[in-house]
Amino acid sequence: MAVETKGHSAISAVMRVKPPRRMHGLIVGVSFAVGLTFGATAGFAQIASDSAPATDETVEATTAEPAVTGADGAETPEVPTTEATAQDATQSDAPQSADQEMVAPSGDATSAVVFMYHRFGEGEYPSTNITMEQFDQHVKELTSGPYTVMGVPQIVSALADGKGLPDRTIGITVDDAYRSVYEKAWPVFREHNLPFTVFVSTEQLDSGYANYMTWDMVRELSKAGVTIGGHSQNHAHLPDFDIDRVKAELANSAARFEEELGYVPEIFAYPYGEANGEVIAAVKEAGYRAAFGQQSGAMHTESDFMYLPRYALNEHYGAMDRFNLAANSLPLVVSDVTPADYTLTRNPPAFGFTLAEPAPSMNCYPSEGEPTMSRLGEERVEIRLDGPVSSGRWRINCTAMGPDSRWRWFGMLYTVP
């Protein structure tokens, strides 16, 4: 990455586990090069057909490591070896989430990490699947490491209200309500008393496809305290729709939740992580109090609660080194982000933000394009690319070393028309 410097010299139930411990040294290597941080412009692409509902199938990754070739074939910018870099409503008698009724643990932390899964033990879909061996390793780490696993609604409430959380608070989410969530993941979560959220696209259940849960299964999870979240009606590319159709997607989905569960969820996940200003306003108007994308990073008190970050996990990129790196990450707090809308109107994008505190060793890594970073004093950062980026999704992650060898991390995902 070329760097120009101006001004000064060059970021359910609650599970309590063991006290915090220091990470096992600074982790740098090819094993972190792909996976959690980026999907390329087609990352987490869903393949739709006339005979089956859209399903997440493909992930392409780029790197945030020195001179490593990503899955899109592009080499990432080389960085000095002296600097380490990191990648990637109303309710019925049955509560939506039992953890919402509990008193959340308190602490001094103002951030949390949320993970995103899709499938479990479905080896024919490695791009969106996690193997059961990998999943068992993740659960073992969460239940024996320095983490507090909390229900996502609790995390959202605490951070939105400016309340402190335990250090290394973790939330777990699963998109799309595949049957393997019910058959393979839920028994493990239940055994270890780990709260989690399932984001459901209602038409995928209504269509009755064998690889998705049934409404009876979703009701069983809900009654057991699993949080159910909204994921639209048809798992569609919402920014591609006119706003009336977006509102219809949300209204139809809400009606089905009310019919089947007796309540409408309060948290939402954008299909593919895609949104724009109109979509976000419609989701908020529909009554959702928080919504998640698919950009990497830790959520915090200053986050946009209608476009919160999550770290994606899959079979290819579910190694423990990556899991630990993300689980221990901290937010790189920024403001005045441009472009402000998450669907681009200018290509190549002119990306920038203002740092809440100086981060002289920060670097930024786009999923496509050769970046030039300009530092305007110690606070303002501007990124310019060498040319237009492909249509689909464009991601950029910026990282800086934080305290105790924990990475500060800010990621964005933009839809490119």
Image (spheres, rainbow, N blue to C red):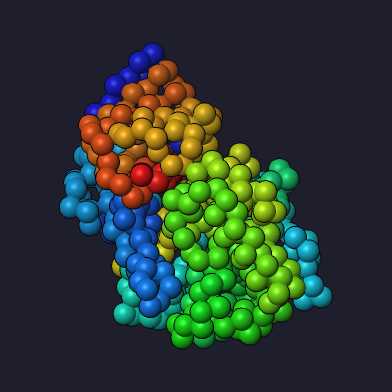
Could you say where residue 292 lies in the image, as x and y percent from the top left?
A: 54, 54
Q: Is residue 354 above or below residue 81?
A: above
Which residue, as the protein is rendered here, is positioned at the far top? 7
Q: What residue lies at 17% left-to-right and 52% top-to-bottom?
A: 73
Give the image location of residue 230, x and y in percent: 60, 63
Q: State the count of labels.
A: 0
Depth check: give the residue in front, 146 or 156.
156
Is residue 15 placed above or below 69 in the rendered structure?
Answer: below
* On screen, residue 117 above or below 105: below
Figure quadrant of residue 81: top left
Left or right of 19: which side holds 58? left
Q: Is residue 184 visible?
A: no
Q: Residue at x 47, y 83 (%)?
A: 209
Quarter the N terminus occupies: top left
Residue 24 lies in what quarter of the image?
A: bottom left
Residue located 38% across and 78% down the image = 51
Q: Viewed as shown, does residue 132 lie left or right of 286?
A: left
> From the viewer's perspective, is residue 131 above or below residue 349?
below
The picture places residue 103, in percent across and down from the top left corner, at 78, 61
Q: Position of residue 107 (x, y in %)?
A: 69, 50
Quick check: can you spot residue 368? yes
Q: Is residue 299 left or right of residue 3?
A: right
97 or 137, which is in the foreground? 97
- Split into 4 quadrants, where in the image is the C terminus? top left
Residue at figure coordinates x 61%, y 39% from the top left: 302
